[in-house]
Amino acid sequence: MCGIVGVFDYAGPGGLDEGLLVRMRDTMTHRGPDDAGVYVAPDGRLGLGHRRLAILDLSSAGRQPMATPDGRYWIVYNGEIYNFMELRSDLEARGHRFRSRSDTEILLALYTEEGPKMLHRLRGMFALGIWDGVTRRLWLARDRIGIKPLYYATHAGRFLFASEIKALLAFPGVPRAVDLEGLYHYLSFLCTPAPGTLFTGIRKLRAGHTLTVEADGSVREEEYWDVFDHVTAVRGADPEELAGRLLGLLREAVRYRMVSDVPFGVFLSGGIDSSTNVALMAELMDRPVETFSIGFEGANGYNEFQYARQVAARFGANHHEVQIGVKDLIGFLPALIHHQDEPIADPVCVPVYFVAKLAKDHGVTVCQVGEGSDELFCGYPIWGMMLRAMGWDRWVGKIPAPLRWLAPAALRAVGRDDTLVYEFLRRGAARESLFWGGAEAFFEGQKRRLLRSGILDRLDSISSYEVIAAHLRRFRERSPLADDDLAWMGYLDLRLRLPELLLMRVDKMTMATAVEARVPFLDHELVTFAMGIPQAVKVANGKLKDLLKQAVTRLLPAEIVHRPKQGFRVPVTEWFLTELGPVVKDVLTTFSREQPYFNPGYVERLLTARNGARTWYLLNFALWHRHWIEEQPMPDRIAASAEAAGWSQP
């Protein structure tokens, strides 16, 4: 796992400054503290930089940027290719010889043989750039699911790319300005949907896509994978047989993700997903699994230690725990904003960082995580309620349009157009999808009250449903389960919430501690299998995750398999009532008064209602704006808390 950066001067005279490239690269030292490399082409028109977290082949032979023996192709790459030894055997049979045991060298050789089509042979997570010195073509790719991020920008005749936005901002003249459309969508989805970011002019490559930059600077983006490319609808199959196939794919996914030359472990919550990771790893190991859990001081209702300890004891794991409190959260805020680059407004970012640090402090560099399981197998209780609502919505569609609009119009007339009830009635009347993803911050009516009129005027008649509608069109065109509500919900989250929120938080927070996170449930072969299974099988008799529970029922204790989902949550609302509340109030009151984005009255209404979740989303944006746009230090109260906790100002 690494940090990559590149500059392609397609229009200028060349003469790229190696020192500048090094400064851009070293904004990401945390992503790769083990080694660093840089390459500048002889004509000074192309530069590549790399920070290395050594996972495979710890020797200097794995150093990047790496070139083919003839010097034509150069690569910088962040990720892991789990089937690289199989690919190596195939390439050796074709006459290739290798000087390292790294997967980077395999990628280069495979590209010389197959070009961009090589992506279809990879099983792993990656963001990479390959330079062809003969055609003067730069080629970028992001993995199928979007586990690894990749950002890019065009500035003054130069194409820039990097693993993190901060590296791009280190290039002179790259503007620091808010993308208002990105802000509007952030307020819906807790993140900015790809290919946009919250920075004007900075983009992120979409999952399953490549980007080709030609010698003249022209850019071409192409999709190479979609969730439904190889999905076959599973109809009439025996659920027991499906559960067996699922367990086999999980075993294979976990086995692949144990490829490592450094110590590895599991983030263990005690839920079914992380416990499955532990159980399957234990089957394959001749030593204890290293497990890591986190809890919250004074918030026992959020802690799952008892279940994590039970699983650790059952499988003989070497178990480690840490607890954090509100002071830890406040003190961490400057580092949080720095490492996120753009707001990822999920408070779970905080415990993910601290549990990753716990792993690193115990000498573990690679950890498996459980992301993706809930989206594939319907693990969220709110999804169960949403499925019922979507069933009722089909009847609403049969009501004539004028009658459908009576209820939302009545609520709007009495000023209740910023409520959940209004929003769902409005979506039903407009025949929009009721489901906008597994996480929503502010509804459309709420955003219209939150944002100032000047911002709304500049955004004209924008709606975040435009993002949803684009995915819905693709779903209907491609899905073999086009009438399956759960298939639609899973597809949307695989395209939006997972790559740009959940997986982004895992990447940014684990890499901040120089830990690599691996995601067995999002192995693309497992995803392909799961997305062909209809809703009636995944949630048989209304039981969430029923198929997954069948698959692992003989693997895990019954109390773990069948206990109600607790979810990985942070007591933000409770902490709002203690030390966090005054911090949030100070920041948001000042920000809404001094900056042109939010209506102070609506912000005050949220603060008075002690709405911990929504004020957290706004706090993230306000602190991001202060740090990255205004380039100002954190407010005194936060800076003092950070200093007391031992954090230095990033």
Image (cartoon, rainbow, N blue to C red):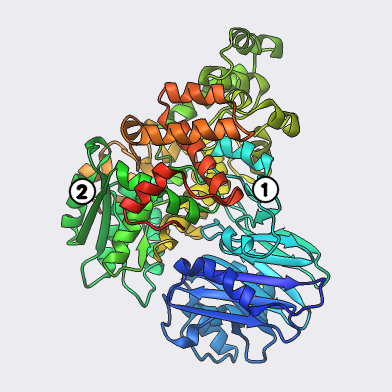
CB-based contact (under 8 Å), mark 1 and mark 2: no
Residue found 63% across the figure and 73% down from its top: 20
Q: Circle 2 — which element?
A: loop
At label 1, the amino acid type is Ala
Please indicate whether residue 51 sits to the left or right of residue 477 in the image.
Answer: left
Q: Circle 1 — which element?
A: loop
Q: From this viewpoint, is residue 439 visible?
A: no
Q: Position of residue 29 (x, y in %)?
A: 48, 69
Please indicate whether residue 4 sits to the left or right of residue 71 in the image.
Answer: left
Q: Where is residue 37 in the image (x, y as percent from the top left)?
A: 55, 80
Chain-order first, disc 1 or disc 2: 1
Density class for disc 1 (Cα within 10 Å; few <14, some 14-19, many ≥20) is some
Q: Where is residue 394 in the image (x, y as percent from the top left)?
A: 59, 22
In the displayed structure, 388 sits above or below 168; it is: above
Q: From this viewpoint, is residue 252 visible?
A: yes
Density class for disc 2 (Cα within 10 Å; few <14, some 14-19, many ≥20) is some
Residue found 26% across the figure and 70% down from its top: 285
Residue found 31% across the figure and 52% down from its top: 645
105 or 12, nearer to the observer: 12
At label 2, the amino acid type is Pro
In the displayed structure, 314 sits above or below 451; it is: below
- Quadrant for residue 355, please give it: bottom left
14 or 377, nearer to the observer: 14
Q: Position of residue 256 (x, y in %)?
A: 41, 68
- Give how far apart the Cα atoms at labels 1 and 2 are: 52 Å
Residue found 22% across the figure and 54% down from its top: 321
What residue does disc 2 label?
557
In the displayed structure, 273 sits above or below 157; it is: above
What residue does disc 1 label?
177
